[in-house]
């Protein structure tokens, strides 16, 4: 015997409508989150909203399905309270003069989120000397012959030279099949400071971007160096982008914004 009642007849329709309603299922799932962190020392004449603000503007436009959060050293909890850190899928880090002010306890929290929980990490330009970058680059060994050629000698995450005598930076796509290179062609931009090879780091998984700087005193002279490298660190993906000196509006450049958006998508852990 079949039990029938008008209410039960409409239940299947109500259930379908409930599943399709905003706020349920995929629509209710929390957006992936990228946090763009900065120490806040870039000049306002070049970056009125700081470097992380410029990066965030590009990401908000290019990654509409992401939650883009700007964080600063001067904020409470140095910009990274536990609630934000724990929901962050990818972290972008720019620093220059205040590496030492970042608390060791915070560095340890970030390190664990990356290596143990798979949070992607993107380090920019002078953030190579950030505490967290050095710690991540120390997970795997760097060859002694490289450590002997950097300044200061023997230091992980150091470069061969740091000289503010550059004119232009030419970025060359070295691994065109890599997701970070998607939609990109070789490009150039004004860039005052050059870092010279080698970079004291573990063997990269990929050197996605290479290139060179031309010099102001002799534009025909080229100083070649790696520009964009990737690693797998613990459970996470990591990308370092050499370009990003604070005296140039690098992060407003459309090609660089494409690099940033691609890198965020690539570094994100599987949900």
Image (cartoon, rainbow, N blue to C red):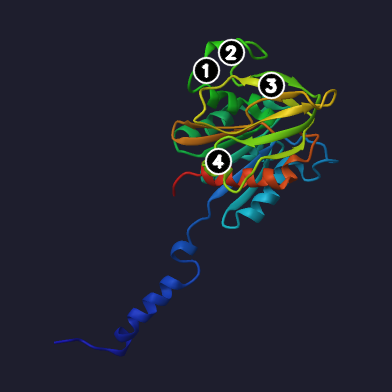
Q: Which of 19 and 202 is in front in this view?
A: 202
Residue that sits furthest to the front in the current view: 220
Labels 3, 2: front one: 3
Q: Which residue is drawn at 74% across and 33% down?
A: 169
Q: Is residue 100 above or below residue 155?
A: below
Judge from the rendering whether residue 15 lies leftward or rightward of residue 176; answer left or right: left
Judge from the rendering whether residue 13 lies leftward or rightward of residue 86; answer left or right: left
Category of crowding for the residue at label 3, using alpha-carbon neighbours closer than 10 angstroms: few (below 14), some (14–19), many (at least 20): some
Q: Using the image, tell me which numbered label, if any, was put on residue 142.
A: 1
Q: CA separation, marks 1 and 3?
A: 17 Å
Label 4: which residue? 176
> Quarter holding the N terminus?
bottom left
Q: CA separation, marks 3 and 2?
A: 14 Å
Q: Using the image, tell me which numbered label, if any, was put on residue 154.
A: none
Label 3: which residue? 196
Q: In this view, does 202 lie above or below 44?
A: above
First of labels 1, 2 by sequence position: 1
Q: Is residue 223 visible?
A: yes
* Residue 137 percent location from the top left of the image: 54, 24
* Residue 19 percent location from the top left of the image: 41, 71
Category of crowding for the residue at label 2, using alpha-carbon neighbours closer than 10 angstroms: few (below 14), some (14–19), many (at least 20): many
Labels 1, 3: front one: 3
Task: Check whether the beta carbons of the residues at disc 1 and disc 4 lie within 8 A of each other.
Answer: no
First of labels 3, 2 by sequence position: 2
First of labels 1, 4 by sequence position: 1
Q: Which residue is drawn at 66% across and 55% down?
A: 61
């Amino acid at each position: 015997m079949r039990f029938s009642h008008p209410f039960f007849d409409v239940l299947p329709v109500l259930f379908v409508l409930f599943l399709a309603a905003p706020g349920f299922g995929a629509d209710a799932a929390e957006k992936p989150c990228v946090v763009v962190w900065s120490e806040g020392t870039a000049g306002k004449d070049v970056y009125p909203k700081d470097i992380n603000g410029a990066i965030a503007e590009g990401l908000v436009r290019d990654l509409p399905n992401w939650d883009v959060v700007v964080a600063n050293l001067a904020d409470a909890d140095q910009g990274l309270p536990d609630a934000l850190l724990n929901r962050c899928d990818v972290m972008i880090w720019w620093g220059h003069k205040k590496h030492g002010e970042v608390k060791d306890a915070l560095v340890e929290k970030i390190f664990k989120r990356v290596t143990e929980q798979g949070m992607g990490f993107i380090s920019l330009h002078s953030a190579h000397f950030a505490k967290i970058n050095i710690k991540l680059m120390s997970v795997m060994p760097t060859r002694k012959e490289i450590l002997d050629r950097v300044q200061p000698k023997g230091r992980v995450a150091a470069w061969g030279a740091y000289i503010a005598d550059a004119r232009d930076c030419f970025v060359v796509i070295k691994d065109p099949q890599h997701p970070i290179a998607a939609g990109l062609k070789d490009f150039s931009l004004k860039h005052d400071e050059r870092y010279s090879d080698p970079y004291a780091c573990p063997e990269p998984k990929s050197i996605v971007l290479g290139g060179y700087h031309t010099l102001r005193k002799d534009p025909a002279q080229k100083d070649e160096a790696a520009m964009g490298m990737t690693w797998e660190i613990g459970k996470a993906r990591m990308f370092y982008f050499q370009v990003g000196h604070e005296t140039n509006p690098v992060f407003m450049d459309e090609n660089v914004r494409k690099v940033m958006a691609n890198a965020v998508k690539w570094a994100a852990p599987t949900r």
